[in-house]
Image (cartoon, grey):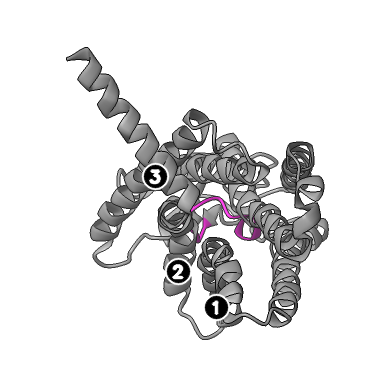
Amino acid sequence: MDLFNSAFGTNTTFIRPPYFIISGFIGLPNMKYYYVFLFFVFIISVLGNVAVMAVICLDHNLRAPKYVAVFNLAFVDLLGSCALVPKVLDIFLLNHYYVPYNDCLAFLFFCYICLSMQALNLVALCYDRLMAIMFPLHYHVKVTHKIMFSMLTFFWLFVITCILIAIGLLTRLSFCKSLVINSYFCDHGQLYKLACNDNFPNSVIGNLLPVLLMWLPFIFIVSSYICIGYVLAKVTAAHERAKTFKTCTAHLSLVVIYFLPIIVTFTMSSRIHPNARIINLSLTSVFPPMLNPIIYVLQTQEIRLSIKRILKGRNKAKIMVK
């Protein structure tokens, strides 16, 4: 990295540097095995999310508002996997560490959009479960296609606006020191800390974004499940409580997979070696898109039945052709 840093004089100010250097995995031992692992995770993520989206599109029985959010989650996971993993493999496996300035900002945009939308999509699915359990008689009034579409549209616009503001503030920075980003992608926090002019607005937005796009969704989800637990505690029959809670298991699994690694990594960041922290964060980025479709297929009866109907329909079609 000293070679990279010495290539730029300390007296030179870059309003728009030609490139940044991504150094997150450089020097770590046995990383080629990790890249092979990332490649297989990427393939499973793409196949799984495409399959979930195809099933929801093909089966007219999956037209409930909830599956609008499930489809959106699969789309976000697919987009996030395609935005992150191929670029990471290109950078570190093919040694393309020099990422052009505009490409780096685009890389940051798509990665942050998808990571943020995963959290907000879990909020939409949580709202569905909250209304279904707390207001079962009014569920079809409180959870409609219009409400779900409006909620997801607002989330998309909100996230895009926040990330564009963060990127807009980055474009005002001058980079006259190191251009080396110690991360596995163009991380916003790593970028603005490299600037040699005033980066206070970037620091503010850098601290505000996790609150708006991660902690507030997490607080809403936890509060919702506290309310759900309070309602279920009033149900006298144990089998009814178990049956109702079972409808939340898929969503709860997604919440744990997404939030738990992030919370553990950030709360123990001072005790974790920087290299281990980068590996943990990269796994946090690639694991949820791979596991989300698997969990929904295994734990959602409607999707399992839909897959069986589609497969039976194809078998019947083949028999009729023969």
Camera-side residue of 151 and 183: 151
Q: Is residue 2 visible?
A: yes
* x then y, percent, for residue 283: 43, 62
Q: Which residue is mark 2?
A: 280
Given contact means CB atoms under 8 Å apart, are the residues at marks 2 and 1 in contact?
yes
Does residue 142 appear to the left or right of 93 in the view shown? right
* x then y, percent, for residue 184: 46, 56
The kind of secondary structure element at disc 2 is helix
Magenta includes 23? no
Q: Residue at x 74, y 59 (%)?
A: 136
* x then y, percent, for residue 214: 69, 63
Q: Which mark is residue 14?
A: none
Q: Which residue is mark 1?
A: 264
Q: Residues within 10 Å of mark 2 (few under 14, many from 20)?
A: some
Q: What is the distance, in whole Å, between disc 3 and disc 1 at their CAs?
A: 27 Å
Work out whether mark 3 precedes mark 1 in sequence or the reverse, and give the earlier one.
Answer: 3
- Amino acid under label 3? Gly
Q: Residues within 10 Å of mark 1 (few under 14, many from 20)?
A: few
Q: What is the distance, in whole Å, between disc 2 and disc 1 at their CAs?
A: 10 Å
Q: Choose mark 2 or mark 3, whichever is in front.
A: 3
Q: Which portion, as a residue range, is magenta?
A: 181-191
Work out whether mark 2 precedes mark 3 in sequence or the reverse, and give the earlier one.
Answer: 3
* x then y, percent, for residue 138: 81, 53
Q: Residue at x 40, y 56 (%)?
A: 298
